Image (spheres, helix red, strand yellow):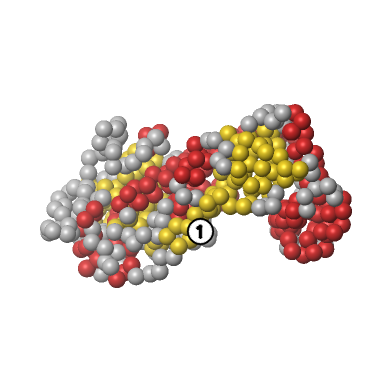
Amino acid sequence: MYRVNAAKLAVDEEANERPRGASEVTRTVVVRSAPLPRRAFKVFVELEGMYRNMVEQLVLYAINNGITKFTRLKGERYREVRSLYPQLPSHYVYTACQDAAERAHSFLRLRRMGRARKPYPEVRSVSIWLDDHLWRAEGLTSISLATHRGRVNVSIELNKHYLRYVNRGWRLATEARVKLDRRERRLVLYLTFRKEVSEYRPKGYITVDVNEDAEAVLIDGIVYLLETDLSRVTLGYYYRRKSVQEKYDRVYGPGSRPARRVLRRLSNNERALKREIRRKLAALIVREAARRQAAIVLERLGKEPANHMIEHIKNPQLRHRIFQAAFKGVQAAIEEKAREHGVPVIYVDPRNTSKVCPIHGAEIVYDRDRHGVCSRGGETWHRDVVACYNLLLRALGGDGGSAPSRLRAFVTVDGGPVPLGPTAAHEPTPIAREAWARWKSLGATSGQKMRVST
Ligand SMILES: [Zn+2]
């Protein structure tokens, strides 16, 4: 295994003189009420009915008149809708206008793109939007809601997630949504938490080279290869959906309802699995970065699927999906988590990051299986290790072509260059998904089982 003393890596102070603004981070947390008595629950069923009706009417009006702005919709419809339900607190009309304007906005956008299948959007599932007049928290375990039958107090069940936000200095925002769980007679509340986070000044870097089935992460001189299998997941679900579709089409004819239901479930499972993989990966990387007060270095990806990364996938739709999930999606998850913890994220030019030797600046000649030989020094490199070090060099300022920064990445603060045998294989440490997904940190890996290649 190849190792440099990156923990002691000197970071150029001037190179980091950029404003580190505070930014606001928003998270939605779901809490459930205790089961309500039949009488109390009925009040919310009535409320939901009225709210749904208002939203349906407002959406219809908004679509017919091309309205996507809340203020205009409210201006033109408030009086009329208000008079429908005079017993309802007036702010439900406000929030119904907001809700409807947002639905109209996204529907009209779909229609412009030619993807709307119906003349009007269906108001299928309703969550009631609340503002500061319609609800308030009464301590930690209870909230009060304004209804057409006066204020109703509802006690909520504390959960770990909710308490974590409360305890870590997040502010509860005034906007919230509530849904009815009819089977259990509970309210499901979607609360919004906000926090101001400011980025710290990085003391070092963690570089992440995103690949279709693994992320190579350079931490403290070790390149970890965290396997994600994201393209394999995408391909697997693609073929499963295809075979389900063929089977159902034979039996029920094309585009049948049972087929659509099965396909939708498969898509939901796929999305959930991918989201979970990316979320855990991002949490692990960001945690390591925050612990070291390091910045995370990512490749700047273009808008179009970077075809060279996944050129073996011939189907353009699949290529796009793999790019979105494995490249864009992983970056987005890391960014989101990083913002929450004030971890700076730096983007560098990804061109040729795996082609040039990070030590000698000479071309690396690859044969197969991601291994190559430096054309000057003759040492062997693994492609992902090369990419990680070159990202680090670019982050250190310089394009990876100037000698000072190249040296800096490999020289310990107090010593000379780290000895590198000319034949040493610079191997990453591959870690299977089942392993890293359970880890709290990469630093505490010594006692854990992992596959280390040497
Ligand atoms: Zn070399």
Q: Which residue is mark 1?
A: 24
The percent position of residue 92, horizontal first and vertical second, equals: 75, 51
The percent position of residue 32, horizontal first and vertical second, equals: 61, 36
Please indicate whether residue 283 sits to the left or right of residue 105 in the image: left
Q: Is residue 222 visible?
A: yes
Residue 42: name its quadrant.
top right
- The quadrant of the image that shows the N terminus is top left
The percent position of residue 221, horizontal first and vertical second, equals: 25, 50
Residue drawn 66% across and 37% down? 154
> Along the line of sight, which residue is nearer the eye, 290 or 378?
290
Please indicate whether residue 63 sits to the left or right of residue 13 in the image: right
Please indicate whether residue 83 sits to the left or right of residue 235 in the image: right
Is 11 drawn above or below residue 230 in the view shown? below
Q: Is residue 355 visible?
A: no
Three-letter amino acid code at the position of disc 1: Glu
Please, which residue is most extreme toward the left here?
415
- The quadrant of the image that shows the C terminus is top left
Residue drawn 52% across and 41% down? 162
Residue drawn 79% across and 41% down? 149
Q: Residues within 10 Å of mark 1 (few under 14, many from 20)?
A: few
Residue drawn 21% across and 56% down? 8
For the residue labelled by badge 1, is the local secondary structure a helix, a strand or a loop? strand
The percent position of residue 143, horizontal first and vertical second, equals: 63, 41
**Figure label count:** 1
> Along the line of sight, which residue is nearer the eye, 261 or 437?
437
